[in-house]
Structure formats: structure tokens, C-alpha cells
Image (spheres, rainbow, N blue to C red):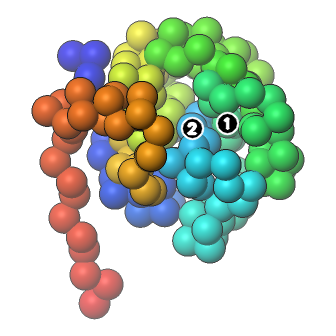
Amino acid sequence: MLHKPDYVFDSVADIPLDFFAKEGIDALILDLDNTLTTHNNPVPDSARLEWFLRVKASGLKMIIVSNNHPERVKPFAEYLGLDFVPEGRKPLPIGYNEARRRLKTDKKRTAAAGDQIFTDVMGCKLAGIRSVFVFPIEPETGFWFRVKRRLERPLLPKRPERRSSL
């Protein structure tokens, strides 16, 4: 099913470091807005930045694919030291395929994380890679985002239970 993610986490910061190795994933394509940071924010919050730095240190290949314009994506990607594909045209597989080409990885060992069913999850399915759905950081205020989120609502996966840190 095009709308059903392979994995679900509350946020990218909740993805355990060992998850990637356990699942045979050596390349991760990351969405930007509402996945790594809020819309138009030039930096991630401390939890997402800490997660990112741990994942990067582990050697996992990463790249950003965003439907946003280069002027939005470039400063953020440079801040994290990542390559990026702007105007990725998700859910079409074009941006995902370009990201895989740059990372030199195959479909079986690649996943992508994002917060939208109609762009990120469906794009992964169309590109033949695994999808990691994360819930959006905050609700969008724009009219079309609100419309899209309302249409997504019946397709959303169940929110994962919070694990105790005890």
C-alpha cells in the first residue's frame, strides 16, 4: 500500500542508533521541514541535533531531499555538513533516485524519513525504498498544509507508545 510506512517513530530523535544496523540500512534520506526542524527554522532543536550527530558519527550515509527551494535547503544542509537535493518533486521518485546515486547505495539498503504520507511515504514506495514515518514537529498554519493534513488523517499510523527510560 502506497500510504503505509514501513516504520513509525514519534520523531527522528526517537529512532534508536542500532535500528539502522538491525534493519540493514546503510543510507538514510532525510526530509527537512517538520522532520529535522520546523518550517523556515535554519537549525534543528537540541534533541534532533544530538540524534543527528550520533547517527552521523556511526557512519550512516545521509542526505537531505526536500521539495523546498535551494535557498531554504542549502543553509540547513551546510549547517549539518550534508549534501542535499532541493526541489525533490516528492512523491515522484526523482529526488530519491538522485540521492541514492549520490550516496552510491542500492534500494535494499536505503530508507527515507519524513513527516507526510502523501509526499514522503508515497515517494518512498514509488522509489522502492523503505519509509520511516515520523510525526510532524508542529502543526502547519498554511491553508494547503491544513487541507493536506486533514486528508492524511485517516491514513496516519498509530503513534508509537512512549518507552520509559527506567
Mark 1 vs 2, N-terminal side: 2
**Residue at 74% across / 27% down in the picture?**
69
From the viewer's perspective, is 129 left or right of 49?
A: left
From the viewer's perspective, is residue 154 above or below residue 78? above
Secondary-structure class at tag 1: strand
The three-letter code of the residue at mark 1 reads Ile
In the rendered image, which quarter is residue 48 located in?
Answer: bottom right
Can residue 121 be seen in the rendering of this structure? no
As measured in the structure, the alpha-carbon distance from the residue carrying label 1 to the one carrying label 2 is: 6 Å
From the viewer's perspective, is 64 left or right of 39?
A: right
Residue 117 percent across, percent down from the top left: 34, 29
**Residue at 54% across / 11% down in the picture?**
93
Q: Which residue is mark 2?
A: 31
In the rendered image, which quarter is residue 151 located in?
Answer: top left
Q: Nearer the viewer, residue 108 or 129?
A: 129
Mark 1–mark 2 CB contact (< 8 Å): yes
Q: Quadrant of the N terminus?
A: top left
The three-letter code of the residue at mark 2 reads Asp
**Residue at 80% across / 29% down in the picture?**
70
Tell me the tag on residue 64: 1
Specify few, some or many for label 1: CA neighbours under 10 Å numbering under 14, 14-19, or 20 or more: many
Residue 14 percent across, percent down from the top left: 41, 63
Specify few, some or many for label 2: CA neighbours under 10 Å numbering under 14, 14-19, or 20 or more: many
